[in-house]
Amino acid sequence: MKSNPLNNDKKKILDRSITTRELIFLLSLVFCLSPFISPPLALLLGIIIAQFIGHPYLHLNHKATHLLLQVSVVGLGFGMNIGTALKASKDGILLTVLSILIVLVLGYIVGKSLKISKEISFLISIGTAICGGSAIAAVSPIINAKEKQISVALGTIFILNSIALILFPIVGHMLHLSQTQFGLWCAIAIQDTSSVVGAASKYGNEALQIATTVKLTRALWIIPIAFASSVIFKSKSSKIKIPYFIGLFVVAILLNTYIPFFEKIGSYIVSVSKTGMTITLFLIGAGLTRNVLASVGFKPIIQGFILWVLIALPAALAVIYL
């Protein structure tokens, strides 16, 4: 009697024992669900896993972090009021516009000086100016960037974000920044949304609300920048990835503001969303493998670091004195 191939495959899956690497990874993931680990520690734990143990599910990492980040950000909207959100957007609009223009101009100059490829330089500049990995993912198909170029740009952004997530709350306390000041500062000066949310949540709830709102308002600039990119690179591509989750974030704020039921359960949704963001940062850290770090190279890191410093310092002064 012939055995069923499908049953054999199922048997292989059932018989397969979990490896030590998978066990350590899964236990670390579970640990990130506990209240004892903060977003910076989760990121650091992920980096340690990536360097010394290895990510057993690396092929799934990008999709998992992308989806989890968006769901978590939408969930944070249930902890916000429309009046607070509008005020934060209004307060941050001038700094947002100025910082985007400055970063794009400086990015072109620095990239040209370091002789970095036009595509990599542009992606790093876009990632720094707007919202990190989301902006790079949106623009890369428009400028026909190769997979290697996208990886280098993403690697640069995530390496610097890892530093920012740990460093910014420390500097914020040293400068005695208020919740409002810190929220504005990290939304402007930290590249990726995940690290902005992680740093702000470490600083306080008010900082988290302001930082998330300003950062997502900033992310809307992906749309005009994407169209401008197609002109600059003379691309005929019409592939523009609009960040639809920002619209869901706004819906969440409206529901929390005007419908009592969501106001009652909002704190629970926010708590779960913060945990989701912590797991996202752990997965981002676990994705920074030795191969990723080696593929980036020094010049893109130098460009990203220069842009980061040139926007972080003036932004800090602006939120303190303006």
Image (spheres, helix red, strand yellow):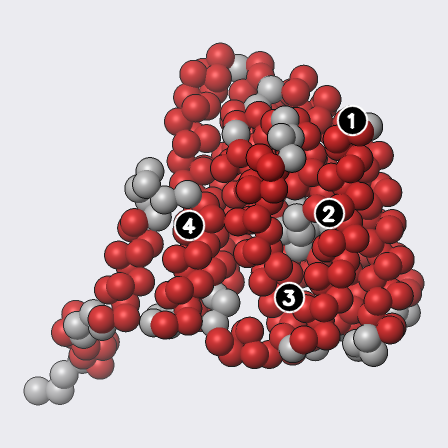
Residue type, numbered disc 2: Ala
Q: Do callouts 1 and 2 mark residues in contact (Cβ within 8 Å)?
A: no
Which image quadrant is residue 56 in? bottom left
| Alpha carbon distance from label 1 to label 2 | 20 Å
Residue mark closest to the camera, 3 vs 4 = 4
**In the rendered structure, which disc, 1 or 3, sits on the residue that comes first in sequence?**
1
Q: Is residue 229 visible?
A: no
Element assignment for label 4 = helix
Choose mark 1 or mark 3, whichever is in front.
3
The residue that mark 1 highlights is 90
Disc 4 marks a residue whose amino acid type is Leu
Local crowd size for mark 4, using a 10 Å CA cut-off: few (<14), some (14–19), many (≥20): some
Mark 4 and mark 3 in contact (Cβ < 8 Å)? Answer: no
Q: Residues within 10 Å of mark 1 (few under 14, many from 20)?
A: few
- Which residue lies under the disc numbered 2? 312
Q: 86 or 144: which is nearer to us?
A: 86
Q: Quickly name the residue at label 3.
A: 156
Q: Is residue 154 above or below residue 177?
A: below
